[in-house]
Image (cartoon, helix red, strand yellow):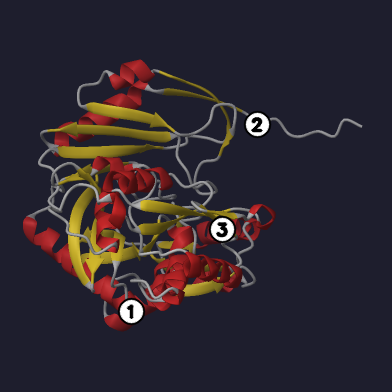
Amino acid sequence: MTASLARDARPRVLILASAHTYRLDPFLEAARKLGVDVVRGLDVPPAHARTRADLLGFDFRDLSRSIKQAQAYGLQNRLQAIIPTDDGTVVLAAHLSEELDLPHNSVEAAEAARDKHLMRTLFARAGVPSPWFKLLSIEDDAIPIAAQVEYPCVLKPTCLAGSCGVMRANNAAEFLAAFERVKKILVQRGLSALLVEGYLPGVEVALEGILNHGGLKVLALFDKPDPLTGPFFEETIYVIPSRLPGATQEKIFAVAAQAAEALGLREGPVHAEMRINAGGVWMLEIAGRSIGGLCSQTLRFGSDLSLEELIVRQALGLEIESAQREGRAGGVMMLPIPGAGILAGVSGLAEAQAVPGIESIEITARVNYPIVPLPEGDSYLGFIFARGEKPEAVEAALRAAHRRLQFEIVPELPITNNQ
């Protein structure tokens, strides 16, 4: 199989992307390299939702209308696959694929991978190791709940990503404070449900895999060397290959496969988060999409294939020459936002880029625009990428480069009414 397809046999895929995702461009580049025609399905306001040859404008909040749009397009244009790029597109992709009779995860599985309460329920039913949990509403009286739950615990929204709204509470007073803070986050987004669940100590890892007819192929296992102990859970460094013992890694792979089966996920990419401690391997979450942000740049496979190329190939039923990851170690640091305000400037880029092992630095936050840290925020200042012979060297390079960066953040001035 050649790297790209003959022009007279070019398939067409619909790639769904939320308005502010980082994930669309890598998929577009993968399709271009493979000679695949792409229709972009973008989340746009209803008044701007227009259809053209290479673009479908959807209102992701209006599922029935989006399905009708896709059906109408599918009657006039052949589609071989629908690929979701982020959490906001997974459920819609399942609905559209079902309507157009394309390979897909079931709608029920896609919904379970987005709803943390349903996910926990199915994990418990299938015996997947995971923390205890209880569904709450923003209308609940938090005082009696705080007196009853086991500490430490974690409060989190049921359907937000990027650790937004995720907080640890060590006692009743912290629980009540966290409850009110999560409540405000949910109200701002028109949501009402949250979880309280047991806090799991231990090291955390992230697994990247791809499902084919229910079989899980592990593509990468990332170590997260920074302790994620709270009170918030901002992720920073991912490093591959994992330095965990082989037997532990095998247990991680088995639990990930068990979790995917419990939700009914059978096709396409999965991204899983797990914790390991003396009690074993514990499943935190598994998503029916690939790794977020720009982190996929860390991964290269076979003859220099990107993660997105593997995903597009698998979606189209094409041969994958090799899913073996390249031999060198790699890593990414998601640059945390230290405080709220306006990003006024960034310095030290040249010094950080000069650190041995640093491959690239991408500052994605926009200068002169507001930035919001966790737990209210859900984004990062940018990403640092490194490669090296050993994971220890990669981790050291990422930390050294981060120390050389300076971010000037100034207070955001309140809006005044000059009347």
Q: How many marks?
A: 3
Q: Is residue 367 above or below residue 152?
A: above
Mark 3–mark 2 distance (CA, rounded to whole Å) = 22 Å
The quadrant in which the C terminus is found is top right
Residue 277 spot, x, y in % from top left? 21, 60
Residue 78, relative to residue 122: is it above or below?
above
Question: Is residue 297 visible in the rendered structure shown here?
Answer: yes
For the residue labelled by badge 3, is the local secondary structure a helix, a strand or a loop? helix
Distance, label 3 to label 1, CA atoms, is 25 Å
Q: Which residue is mark 1?
A: 124
* 385 left or right of 411 in image: left
Quick one: 16 or 71, which is closer to the camera? 71
Secondary element at image label 2: loop
Q: Residue at x 44, y 59 (%)?
A: 87
Q: Residue at x 49, y 64 (%)?
A: 159
Q: Which amino acid does the dot numbered 3 rest on?
A: Val
Residue at 49 percent across and 66 percent down: it is 76
- Mark 3 sits on what residue? 182
Front in this rendered view, residue 24 or 137: 24
N-terminal of the two: label 3 or label 1? 1
Residue beneath the point at 85% across and 34% down: 417
Q: Position of residue 40 (x, y in %)?
A: 47, 52
Spot occupied by residue 2 in the image (x, y as percentages of width and height): 17, 49
Q: Residue furthest left?
A: 246
Going by the numbered disc 2, the residue's amino acid type is Glu
The residue nearer to you, when weighing 304 against 78, is 78
Q: Which comes sooner in the sequence, label 3 or label 2?
A: 3
Judged left or right of residue 39, residue 253 is left
Helix, strand or loop under label 1: helix
Q: Residue furthest front?
A: 8
Per the rendering, the mark at residue 412 is 2
